[in-house]
Amino acid sequence: MNMEEKLGRVYLISAFKKAFDDRVFREYYSLGIEDIAVLNNFMKEDYKYISSKILETQEAQYYFSDNMDFKNKMEKLQEIKEYTLNLLRENHIDTVSSTHIISIVIGNNSKIIEIAENMRRKGFMLYGVKEPTVPKGTARFRIGLNPQLSKEDILRFVKELKYEIDTVF
């Protein structure tokens, strides 16, 4: 059993906490001052990493006794991530992503622009990452999941994206 199988996806706490300084990050993931306090408590105890499995330990539960909302958000994000990745696989939409930030390579700039425009007309704010930002032929969508998303919304998104990928050009 490798480390990820033992601990789940592991994150460097200091990097995660640094992201909390970004207002957009906090709002996107619905994280509050209490959530930052939880990470500070972990760092005070010399924890360097955090993962879903670490959050299940009795020691971690002590830190969450006043803030179970943080743990619930992280669990929901993990659930949404797994659901989305499975849906993408079932619909033959390729990604090498294994986190809540999912990259879907489409290929060329013109195709990604048209798909993004069509998806916006369907109510999805989707922007492509195009060359020269990424290497030629690897234009992609980068999708960030958050704990506020419903499975119904994700299902609708994946179905619409699959239709666009199959029909554009």
Image (cartoon, rainbow, N blue to C red):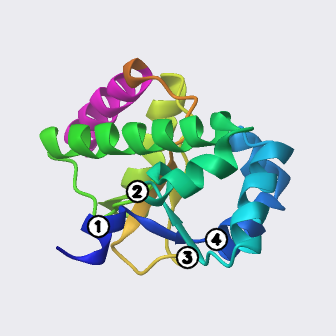
Q: Which residue is denoted by mark 1 in the rendering?
A: 6
Q: Which residue is denoted by mark 3 in the rendering?
A: 133
- The amino acid on which the numbered mark 4 sits, given as a three-letter code, is Ile
Mark 1 closeness class: few <14, some 14–19, many ≥20 residues within 10 Å: few
Tell me how far mark 3 sits from mark 2, CA to CA.
35 Å
Where residue 71 sits, quadrant-wise, is: top right
Tell me how far mark 2 sits from mark 4, CA to CA.
14 Å
Left-right relation of 64 to 90: right
Name the residue at 72% across, 60% down.
39
Q: Which residue is denoted by mark 4 in the rendering?
A: 13
Label 1: which secondary element: helix
Q: Earlier in the sequence, mark 3 or mark 1?
A: 1
Magenta part of the protein: which range? 153-169
Closer to the observer: label 3 or label 2?
A: 2
Tell me how far mark 3 sits from mark 4, CA to CA.
28 Å
Label 3: which secondary element: loop
Q: Position of residue 149 (x, y in %)?
A: 52, 28
In which quadrant is the N terminus drawn? Answer: bottom left
C-beta proximity under 8 Å, tags 3 and 4: no
As rendered, which of 156 and 21 lies closer to the eye?
21
Q: Earlier in the sequence, mark 2 or mark 4?
A: 4
Left-right relation of 23 to 10: right
- The amino acid on which the numbered mark 3 sits, given as a three-letter code, is Thr
Closer to the observer: label 3 or label 4?
A: 4
Q: Point out which mark residue 63 bears.
A: none
C-beta proximity under 8 Å, tags 1 and 2: yes
Q: Earlier in the sequence, mark 1 or mark 2?
A: 1
Q: Which residue is denoted by mark 2 in the rendering?
A: 53
Asked if residue 162 lies in the magenta stretch, the reply is yes
Where residue 114 sits, quadrant-wise, is: top left
- The amino acid on which the numbered mark 1 sits, given as a three-letter code, is Lys
Q: Earlier in the sequence, mark 3 or mark 2?
A: 2
